[in-house]
Image: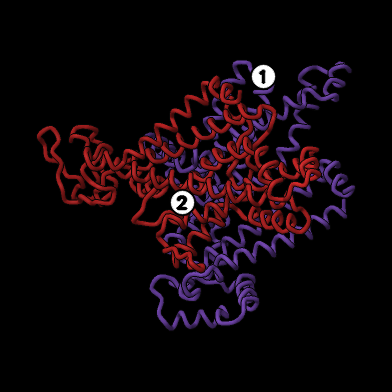
Amino acid sequence: MAAGRFLRNRLALAFLGVFVLIVLFVLAAPLWAEHVAETGPNETHTLEKLAIDGEQRDVVTPEGRPIGPVWFDAGGKFFLGADSRLGRDEMVRLMYGGRTSLLIGIASAAITTALAVLLALLAGYYRGWVDALIARTLDVIWSLPALLLGIALGVSLAVGGLKLGPIELSGGSLWVPVLIITVVSIPYVARPLRGEVLALTRKEFIEAAVAQGAGPLRVMLREILPNLSSTIIVFFTLTIANNLLLEAGLSFLGAGVQPPNSSWGTMISVGEELLKTAPLLAIVPGAMIALTVLALNIVGDGLRDALNPRAKIRLEAHAGRVEPEGAAV
Amino acid sequence: MARFVVRRLAGMVAVLFAVSVVVFFVFNVIPNSDPAERMAGKNATAALVENIEEDWSFDEPLPQQYLAMMGKVFTGELTSYEPEIPVNERIAEGIPATLSLAIGAAAIWMFFGILLGYLSAQRPHGWLDKLLGGISVAGISIPVFLLGPVLIYLLAEQLGLFPNGQYVGITEDPLDWAYHLVLPWLTVATLSIGFYSRVLRSNMLDAMDEDYVRTARAKGLSERQVLRRHVLRNSLIPIVTLFGLDFGATVAGTAIITESIFDLQGVGFYAAEAVGNLELPPIMGITLYGAFFVVLFNALVDVAYAYLDPRVRLGSEAR
């Protein structure tokens, strides 16, 4: 029934299509790099020339200006031009950068949601001091401005990496931004979920399960968790969108993805320096982020309407990361 | 009321302490490299690292380290090491630009957010509502790091209508100050205009079903009076709370990215610069002060909210 409702929502369906296209686009990165552009995302072509209509043009002019979009004039090479005075292929970087952005967004959203569900179940089921400890900790993280906390963690970890028991991450690892974004975004999911678990545990069917002798694990996993599933699906979708935005903000400032890796956020900060002469270098990755976030938000709203039309599920508004209620009219 | 204020402020102090401990852990305790080396910066000398180790009590137990850090933050001794610049001075220099950006943007988003929301709620699902709804959704979906470059390129570089960022002090030339800030203001405000107009619209539609609105209509008020005096007034209360959260978040979030895009020499610009150089002390200072500002501002908004809406303070005392 829920699936039927979602399939009737043409707007949500169309934007699900957009999101699938974006995923296919970034997955095609190695194919495009190998067969069309014939270069990698970090290969520089500073002193090379490009044959366009029988004319030889510099990839980077002697003044350091990168070539603009040449579309298919050079057989797909430098489709969107070069990225900077380093002369890297912007299209290849856009595809590989999108992989990084989506990977971080989806991985951090998955870990955030899983941890948030665990914390919400523990807090809501055991209550008492367990709940107090979890809820107060979440409150403190929530009261810190998300971007500032992300920057603080980002810089601190980028300098020295992380050594925690068996876990050892270098400062440039992609897991560092995933970890940071997970820590920062947990309260936005865990706080509303905890409220929902608290409400569920007061229902009669939980009482009935306990009366039948069901232990804590059984009640949490077999009775409460299935009732959270529609909320979890919606939150997961919306969290990917929010985490993409946070990743882009952190990487734009230099506290997220570290070189040589790049993401859409780092591409904007590289492109921004050449805004006067080559505006597309900053605007195209920015537009990709906006399109992805818009698609995910509309799909998330559509899922919410389909799964539970009466519920007002929304991420808590804070730190500029606001999720409008019923934004998709 | 007094009891509410005291309780809220006590809660605030507890949160401030917890926040400072989190920041302490982020910078001093996260197990990775030597904290003194991290603090010193990229090309520090061995002597400097040793100095910092001594100065920050890095070889003593954690409580002493915490006290050393807080002592530095509150006496204004926090400095970046290469070159040695007092963090507090740089932050103080940046505050006028940051507040100019945040306050101006907030005024714009509140004005247009309320105006558009009010107009949308006049005739729900009418053509104006649908048009404004579409504009709002578009506004909400544009992140600052897309809108900023687009505005700079189109309105500053191509058409030359506005200057390309840079901050001019309000005391130097108020007109030039506003002229330089128009694009950054729009960049920050757009997202919130869309969001606030949607929230206000949905609040107003909910309020229209309330009994007091029916009463107001029944006693013969005109539709316009009902909307303005009863529906709008009551729907604005939640907007105040939202504003409290968002204003703090703008100062300590969106403003950082926007200042860096528009080269406004504010606190956020300083933060971005420190991130670029991987300097920890400025980031520590900005994170702590920023978090303090946000927590303090939220507490003030809660108190103002309790003053406006007695249900809040009575509800919390009854509990």
Q: Splitting the image into 4 quarters, where does residue A36 fall?
A: top left
Q: Which chain is purple?
A: B
- Residue B266 visible here: no
Q: Quadrant of residue A29?
A: top left
Chain letter of mark 2 equals: B
**Residue under the point 41% across and 64% down:** A170
* Residue A62 on image: x %, y %: 18, 50
Q: Which chain is the one coloured red? A: A
Residue indicated by mark 2: B260
Q: Secondary structure under badge 1?
A: loop
Of A157 and A220, nearer the camera is A220
Q: In the figure, B227 relative to A246: above or below?
A: above
Which sits in the foreground, B180 or B247?
B247
Residue A150 percent coordinates (x, y): 53, 55
Numbered tag placed on residue B124 in the rendering? 1
Q: Position of residue A295 (x, y in %)?
A: 49, 32
State the separation of the CA atoms marked 1 and 2: 40 Å
Residue at horizontal 59 percent and vertical 82 percent from the top:
B60
Q: Is residue A125 left or right of residue A251?
A: right
Q: Nearer the viewer, residue B134 or A164?
A: A164
- Marked residue chain, label 1: B
Judge from the rendering whether residue A264 lies leftward or rightward of residue A63; answer left or right: right
Q: Position of residue B135 (x, y in %)?
A: 54, 27
Q: Residues within 10 Å of mark 2 (few under 14, many from 20)?
A: many
